[in-house]
Image (cartoon, grey):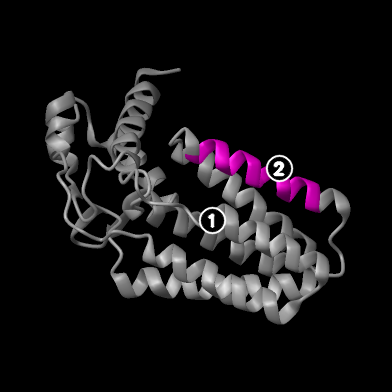
C-alpha cells in the first residue's frame, strides 16, 4: 500500500468511526484545509476519503459549500421510513407464495442473531441481522428493482439508526424489532396479507419513535487527528 493510500485510509477510517460512534455531530462540516494542516498531507487523499463517505450516505457534498456529516430533517427521516414501509408491503405481497421453509429458518436465525446483538449492545451486528431479515423477503419478491430500492433504503435508514436511535444509550428502552419480526414470520406462514400490512406499518412507526433527535455532546473534526 502506498503512503497516499495509507493516509487516505486513515482519514476514511477515522472519520467513519467518529460518525458511526456519534462523536461527530450530524451537520458538522469536514473542512479539508483543517484536516490537511493537522496531518500535513495534500488535500487529494482527504477529498477521496470524503468521497467514499458520501457514497455510503454518511456525508453530504454540497456544491460551493463543502462536505457535511449527513443531517436529515425529521421529515426526511419519516419520508424514508414511510417509503421503505410501502415498498416492503409490496415485497411481502409478491413474496408470500414463494417463501420456503429454508427462508423461514433463515429469518428465525436472523432474529436470534438480532437478540444476541441487542444483548451485547452491538449496533453493527444488530443492523446486519435486521437487514438480513428484510432482504430475505425482498429477494423472494422476484423483482430486481424492488430489491434494489429496498436495500438502498435499508442502508439509508440504518444510518439514521446509527445517528439517532436511543436504545444503545438508554438501558431501560425495550427494542420492539425482534418481536415485530417474529409476528411477521407468523403472518407470512398464514399468508395473512391484511395482518402483515398492519404489523409492518406498526413496525416502522415504532422505528421512527425510537429515534431520539435531541442534542448530544460531540467532538469537533479538529479533535480527531
Q: Can residue 143 be seen in this view?
A: no
Q: Is residue 14 magenta?
A: no
Coordinates of residue 102 in the picture (x, y in percent): 85, 48
Callout 1 crowding tier (Cα within 10 Å): few <14, some 14–19, many ≥20: some
User: Vertically, is 160 above or below 203?
Assistant: above
- 88 relative to 50 in the view: left or right: right
Question: Residue at image x 54%, y 56%?
Answer: 177
- 6 relative to 223 in the view: left or right: right
User: Pointer 2: what residue?
Assistant: 109
Going from N to C along the chain, the mark reached first, 1 or 2, is: 2
Question: Residue at image x 50%, y 57%?
Answer: 176
The quadrant of the picture occupied by the C terminus is top left
User: Vertically, is 191 above or below 69?
Assistant: below
User: Vertically, is 160 above or below 4?
Assistant: below
Question: Residue at image x 53%, y 72%?
Answer: 202
Coordinates of residue 173 in the picture (x, y in percent): 37, 51
User: Pointer 1: what residue?
Assistant: 177
Q: Which mark is residue 106?
A: none
The mark tally for this picture is 2
- The magenta-colored residue range is 104-118
User: Vertically, is 223 above or below 155?
Assistant: above
Question: Residue at image x 24%, y 53%?
Answer: 26
Main SS class of the magenta portion in the image = helix
Amino acid at each position: 500500500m502506498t503512503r497516499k493510500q495509507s493516509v487516505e485510509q486513515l482519514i476514511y477510517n477515522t472519520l467513519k468511526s467518529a460518525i458511526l460512534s456519534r462523536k461527530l455531530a450530524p451537520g458538522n462540516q469536514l473542512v479539508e484545509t483543517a484536516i490537511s494542516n493537522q496531518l500535513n498531507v495534500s488535500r487529494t487523499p482527504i477529498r477521496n476519503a470524503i468521497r467514499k463517505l458520501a457514497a455510503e450516505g454518511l456525508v453530504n457534498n454540497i456544491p460551493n459549500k463543502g462536505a457535511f456529516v449527513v443531517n436529515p430533517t425529521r421529515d426526511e427521516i419519516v419520508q424514508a421510513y414511510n417509503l421503505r414501509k410501502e415498498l416492503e408491503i409490496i415485497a411481502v405481497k409478491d413474496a408470500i407464495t414463494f417463501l420456503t421453509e429454508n427462508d423461514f429458518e433463515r429469518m428465525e436465525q436472523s432474529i436470534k442473531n438480532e437478540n444476541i446483538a441487542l444483548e451485547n449492545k452491538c449496533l453493527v451486528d444488530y443492523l446486519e441481522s435486521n437487514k438480513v431479515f428484510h432482504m430475505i423477503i425482498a429477494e423472494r419478491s422476484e423483482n430486481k428493482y424492488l430489491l434494489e430500492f429496498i436495500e438502498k433504503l435499508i442502508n439509508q435508514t440504518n444510518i439514521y439508526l446509527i445517528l439517532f436511535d436511543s436504545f444503545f444509550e438508554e438501558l431501560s428502552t425495550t427494542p420492539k424489532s425482534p418481536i415485530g419480526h417474529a409476528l411477521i414470520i407468523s403472518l407470512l406462514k398464514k399468508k395473512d396479507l391484511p395482518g402483515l400490512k398492519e404489523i409492518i406499518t406498526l413496525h416502522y412507526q415504532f422505528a421512527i419513535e425510537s429515534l431520539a433527535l435531541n442534542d448530544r455532546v460531540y467532538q469537533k473534526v479538529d479533535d480527531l487527528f
